Amino acid sequence: MMNKQPLVFLSMLCLSLAANAQTPKLYKDLIFHEVTIDKDQSYAPKDQKDDTKFHLFDLYQPKGDRSTARPLIIWMHGGGFKFGSKDVPEIELWCKNFAQRGYVCAGINYHLDKITTSFNYDQLQKSCYYAVQDAKMAVAYFKQHHKEYGIDPDKIILAGNSAGGMIALQAAYVSDSELAKMAGLNEQGQPGLLNVVAIVNFWGGIFDINWLKNAHVPIVNVLGNKDRVMPPTHKSGPLFGGIDIHNEADKLHIPNELKIFDGYAHQLERHFNPVFPAGKATRQRWLEAAQFAADFLYRTMFSD
């Protein structure tokens, strides 16, 4: 008679492996069904009246989560430093999506440029400088109030799309004094580099690729290879895009990954037009970008 023990053992092993493979992982997969949202909070409570709107944030948390030391993602919108807010559809989508994975997410406003003239590279540098100061103010606020929000102050991630991605990169990789010097400003800002654990750069860029030598913060880049607003490489525009960042980060052994959406432009649109709202297909690509970033963050921060 055939010994059935090896077959039984093999069956149990297969079932165990299958169960483990299907078990959702916190911070990687969608764990929580519902998210709570606290709207229009301030990360600069002592603001003057005129500045209040620029320092508002919406806080997204997984409903029912009782963890007290969760990673925080600060999300910053795009809009060329002239338009946009924390209420744009993509920021709301990513904040909800990552909160469902177990993160705390803050979609923030920041100072926008009051000058309404056409694109000006010098003004772009100045606008980025001031937006970076707001991002650093937000990081300082959440570190100070980490117990109140159940946040691990040593696990703060900066994330953004377009101008928001630019803010995240510059905030993590260049000192205020160097950024001010580039922008032709006298401000000194905060000394040293900002302490964050990762950058999520959705179709943003960095002014000087050599700044990547200043730190060792992991970066995940997502972009469309037909992007003409923020071209993927310095060959087609004044900034260094996601492909440049990926290649330089590889040389410097900075943990990073790159996802390219072939045939798509800015915002992962087929034909980018900021006037019209994104369609269902574009929103699906935003969700694909979110999953790619979540997988990278999980491998970088949580996997053994």
Image (cartoon, helix red, strand yellow):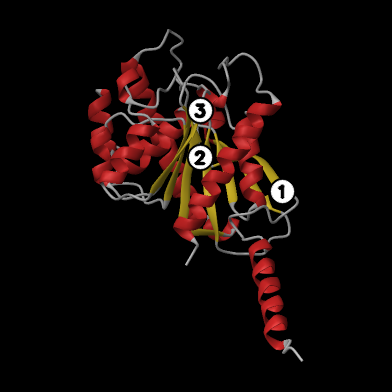
Q: Looking at this view, name the residue that lies furthest to the bottom.
A: 1
Which numbered disc covers residue 36?
A: 1
Q: Could you tell me residue 269's position as x and y percent?
A: 58, 22
What amino acid is at disc 3? Asp
Residue at 64 percent across and 63 percent down: it is: 21
Q: Where is residue 80 in the image (x, y as percent from the top left)?
A: 46, 21
- Which residue, given by chain and number where applicable, does mark 3 sit on? 262
Quarter holding the N terminus is bottom right
Residue 46: mark: 2
* Lower position in the chain sequence, tag 1 or tag 3: 1
Nearer to us of marks 1 and 3 is: 3
Residue contact at pointers 1 and 3, CB within 8 angstroms: no
Cβ–Cβ below 8 Å for labels 3 and 2?
A: no
Judge whether 27 appears above or below 9 on screen: above
**SS at mark 1?**
strand
Is residue 283 visible in the rendered image? The answer is: yes
Q: With respect to residue 71, does 230 lie above or below?
A: above
Q: Is mark 3 on a helix, strand or loop?
A: loop
Q: Is mark 2 on a helix, strand or loop?
A: loop
Residue type of the residue flagged with mark 2: Lys
Crowdedness near tag 2: few (<14), some (14–19) or many (≥20) residues, C-alpha within 10 Å = few
Of callouts 2 and 1, the N-terminal one? 1
Quadrant of the image occupied by residue 40: top right
What's under tag 1, amino acid-wise? Thr
Q: On the image, which quarter does residue 147 sit in?
A: bottom right
* 146 vs 208, nearest the viewer: 208
Camera-side mark, 2 or 1 = 1
The earlier-in-sequence mark between 3 and 2 is 2
